[in-house]
């Protein structure tokens, strides 16, 4: 497990932890898999809804893959003030390390849409010396 990364934008706090899934990876075939847990907490005074996501996934060679889509894990969660939403997802890489960051696009109950930054976090195999972060 990696250290937890945190960021707050527009009173929305994002916390991310990543995990290398050794049992689902095949290093000899350049196939590495990570899971990441995300906690989204509404520290504001207005109810918000997560509409879309945009991820940038960067491998050890600097190759970037962008992922855009509606909601997260098939949901568009609504968070009332003080409430949070947690989910786990995953990503494959063809290198043994990488980096992810991105944004959530949300709307509040007054119709104002805004972007919430997701902090950059490392995708590194534990105890390997070649790390991006």
Image (cartoon, rainbow, N blue to C red):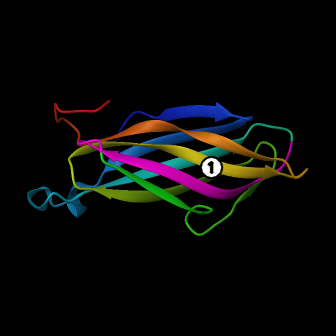
Q: Which residue is mark 1?
A: 104
Q: Residue furthest right?
A: 110
Residue 132, quarter of the rendered image: top left
Q: Secondary structure at mark 1?
A: strand
For image coordinates 39% across by 45% down, the residue present is 18
Q: Residue furthest front?
A: 63
For image coordinates 54% across by 33% down, the residue present is 6
Question: Residue 33: where, in percent of width, then height?
Answer: 28, 57
For image coordinates 68% across by 34% down, the residue present is 9
Is 47 within the magenta?
Answer: yes
The one of 75 and 127 positioned closer to us in this rendering: 75
The residues colored magenta run 46-62
Using residue 29 as the reference point, say whether residue 10 is left or right of it. right
Q: Residue furthest left?
A: 28
Using residue 68 as the reference point, say whether residue 77 is left or right of it. right
For image coordinates 64% across by 66% down, the residue present is 75
Question: Residue 21: where, in percent of width, then height?
Answer: 28, 55
Q: Residues within 10 Å of mark 1 (few under 14, many from 20)?
A: many
Question: Residue 71: where, in percent of width, then height?
Answer: 63, 62
Disc count in the image? 1
Using residue 102 as the reference point, say whether residue 63 is left or right of it. left
Using residue 120 as the reference point, say whether residue 93 is left or right of it. left
Residue 34 lies, with reference to residue 44, above or below; the image says: below
Residue 1, quarter of the rendered image: top left
The secondary structure that most of the magenta stretch takes on is: strand
Placement of the C terminus among the 4 image quadrants: top left
The one of 79 and 121 positioned closer to us in this rendering: 121
Is 1 within the magenta?
Answer: no
Residue 113 lies, with reference to residue 117, above or below; the image says: below
The one of 74 and 126 positioned closer to us in this rendering: 74
Question: Residue 131: where, in percent of width, then height?
Answer: 24, 33
């Amino acid at each position: 497990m990696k250290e937890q990364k945190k960021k707050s934008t527009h009173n929305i706090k994002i916390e991310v932890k990543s995990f290398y899934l050794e049992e689902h990876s095949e290093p000899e075939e350049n196939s590495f898999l990570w899971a990441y847990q995300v906690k989204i907490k509404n520290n504001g005074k207005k109810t918000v809804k997560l509409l879309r996501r945009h991820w940038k996934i960067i491998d050890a060679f600097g190759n970037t893959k962008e992922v855009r889509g509606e909601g997260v894990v098939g949901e568009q969660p609504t968070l009332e003030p003080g409430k949070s939403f947690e989910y786990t997802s995953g990503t494959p890489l063809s290198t043994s390390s990488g980096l992810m960051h991105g944004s959530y696009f949300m709307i509040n109950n007054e119709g104002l849409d805004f972007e919430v930054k997701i902090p950059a976090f490392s995708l590194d195999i534990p105890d390997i010396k070649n790390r991006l972060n």
